[in-house]
Image (cartoon, grey):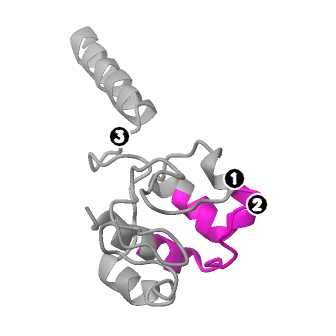
């Protein structure tokens, strides 16, 4: 009976370490995009007037090709605001969610002023952006 209890305790500790380390039971990073990429592509059509998804093609906003995992203010050839240049963010799903909810709240002085108030829309767009590599 003692060894069975020890096994369960070991499993509980291991599970706790996995959760604390950012791995969920589904073996996905804790901050992974949870939306629908196809729906996100449709929602992104609202963003496409300023942002391209083609590599190196900047418009009013920077290209978002490969944005997930990229450092803020790092897209070559785009003229960022001083606020974005110095923000020091990494565009992971959690940071993108905060930014898309209120760009000026996260980066005071950013050029971006459009937000996505719907959590579902934000998650869907982030899932779509995660496919652009």
Quarter of the image where the C terminus is located? bottom left
Q: Measure the alpha-carbon separation of dots 2 and 3.
A: 34 Å
Q: Tell me what residue is drawn at x 63 percent, y 54 percent.
A: 84
Image side of residue 25 versus residue 86, left or right = left
Tell me where residue 54 sits by quadrant. Answer: bottom left
Q: Are marks 2 and 1 in contact (CB under 8 Å)?
A: yes
Image side of residue 111 versus residue 34, left or right = right
Badge 3 is on which residue? 23
Q: Which is nearer the N-term, disc 1 or disc 3?
A: 3
Badge 1 is on which residue? 82
Badge 2 is on which residue? 109
Q: Tell me what residue is drawn at x 41 percent, y 38 percent.
A: 22
Q: Nearer the viewer, residue 37 or 114?
A: 114
Image side of residue 65 versus residue 103, left or right = left
Up-down relation of residue 45 to residue 22 (above or below): below
Q: Secondary structure at mark 2?
A: loop
Q: Tell me what residue is drawn at x 47 percent, y 78 percent.
A: 51
- The span picked out in magenta is 96-124
Q: Nearer the viewer, residue 123 or 15?
A: 123
Up-down relation of residue 15 to residue 72 (above or below): above
The circle drawn on residue 52 is: none
């Amino acid at each position: 009976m003692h060894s069975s209890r020890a096994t369960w305790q070991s499993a509980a500790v291991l599970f706790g370490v996995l959760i604390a380390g950012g791995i969920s039971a589904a073996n996905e990073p804790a901050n992974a995009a949870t939306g629908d990429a196809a729906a996100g592509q449709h929602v992104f059509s609202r963003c496409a007037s300023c942002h391209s998804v083609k590599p190196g093609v900047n418009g009013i906003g920077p290209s978002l090709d490969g944005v997930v995992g990229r450092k803020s203010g790092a897209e070559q050839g785009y003229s960022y605001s001083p606020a974005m240049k110095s923000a020091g963010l990494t565009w992971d799903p959690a940071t993108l969610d905060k930014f898309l909810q209120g760009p000026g709240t996260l980066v005071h002085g950013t050029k971006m002023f459009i937000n996505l108030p719907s959590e579902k829309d934000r998650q869907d767009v982030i899932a779509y952006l995660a496919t652009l590599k």
